[in-house]
Image (cartoon, rainbow, N blue to C red):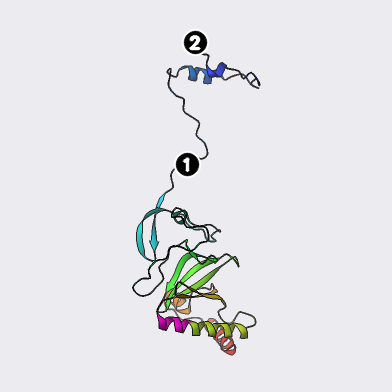
Amino acid sequence: MFLPSRCNRKNPLTAPSTPPDPSRCAAAADLPAGRPRKRARHGWDVAPATKAQITFCGQEVGDMTTLVLPSHPPDYTCFSLLSKGVARNASPPRREDDKDGHYVFAVGENLTSRYKIYRKMGEGTFGQVLECWDRERKEMVAIKIVRAVNKYSDAAMIEIDVLQKLARNDATGKHCVQIRNWFDYRNHICIVCEKLGPSLYDFLRKTAYRPFPIDLVRELGEQLLESVACV
C-alpha cells in the first residue's frame, strides 16, 4: 500500500502558506522504510549539570550537583540542598560540631530563615566569621558564630552588651562597628554586624608591612580618638 510523503500531505483545515521545500521532500524520501524520524532538539535538551565538590567547613563529602553563588546571591537555595529535600529558607539538617566546638556548615545553607551563608571570612579563638545574605535588610552582613564552649559563650554575651551600648552612643553609626542582630542558633551565639573591609593587620600584611604615610597615620589616629569618645 503506497503512502504519500509527509511533505506532500495537506491539512484539510488549513493549507500551507508556502509551497513545500523540494530539498526537504527529497531528503525525506531517502530515509529507509520503517526508520523512525529524529525529533527536533528542544530548549530543555541541555547538557547535564556539572559536578562540583561540596565542602563542609574544610571537610570534603563527595561530588554533588551544586550552584556557584553570585556576588549578591538571590533568594533561592542551592540545587544540592533541594535534592536532599531541604525546603526553601529552611534550616539544614543538624550536624555535630567539630572537635573544637566550631559550627559545621556548607556554603549556600541557611542560618535561620533570614540569613543565607555565602562564604567564610575568617576564623579565630572565639569562633568563625561568615559572610551572609540578609534577606530582610537586603544586604551582605558578617556573622560571628561563637564556638559552643561555655566560656566563649559567656564572653560573647558581654561583647553583645558592649556593642549595643556603643551603638546607642554612636548616633552617626560611623565610629564603631554596628551590631545588627544577635541570636542563639543550635547552642552557638551568633552576632550579626555590618560587613566591613579588612582589619589593620590584614592591610599591613598585604602591603608587605611597609610604613604608612604620615597623612594616613594621622587619619587613623583621628578615627581611633573619635571611637574612644563614643565609649
From the viewer's perspective, is 153 left or right of 113? left
Magenta segment includes 150? yes
Quarter of the C terminus within the rendering: bottom right
Query: Which amino acid lies under the numbered mark 2 shown in the image of this protein?
Result: Phe
Per the rendering, the mark at residue 2 is: 2
Q: Position of residue 203 (x, y in %)?
A: 47, 75
Magenta segment includes 101? no
Q: State which tag comes first along the sequence, 2 or 1.
A: 2
Within 10 Å of the Cα at label 2, are there few (<14), some (14-19), or many (20+) other Cα atoms?
Answer: few
Q: Which residue lies furthest to the left in this view?
A: 99
Q: Position of residue 186 (x, y in %)?
A: 45, 72
The residue beneath circle 1 is 46
Q: Is residue 220 visible?
A: no
Helix, strand or loop for disc 1: loop
Query: Which amino acid lies under the numbered mark 1 shown in the image of this protein?
Result: Val
Q: Position of residue 100 (x, y in %)?
A: 35, 75
Q: What stretch is highlighted in magenta?
A: 147-156
Q: Can residue 186 be seen in this view?
A: yes
Residue visible at 45% across and 84% down in the picture:
155
Residue visible at 44% across and 68% down in the picture:
120
Helix, strand or loop for disc 2: loop
Residue visible at 46% across and 28% down in the picture:
38
Within 10 Å of the Cα at label 1, are there few (<14), some (14-19), or many (20+) other Cα atoms?
Answer: few
Query: Looking at the picture, does residue 49 appear above or below residue 226?
Result: above
For this rendering, which residue is in front, 53 or 110? 110
* Res 105 quadrant in image: bottom left
Per the rendering, the mark at residue 224 is: none
From the viewer's perspective, is 140 left or right of 187? right
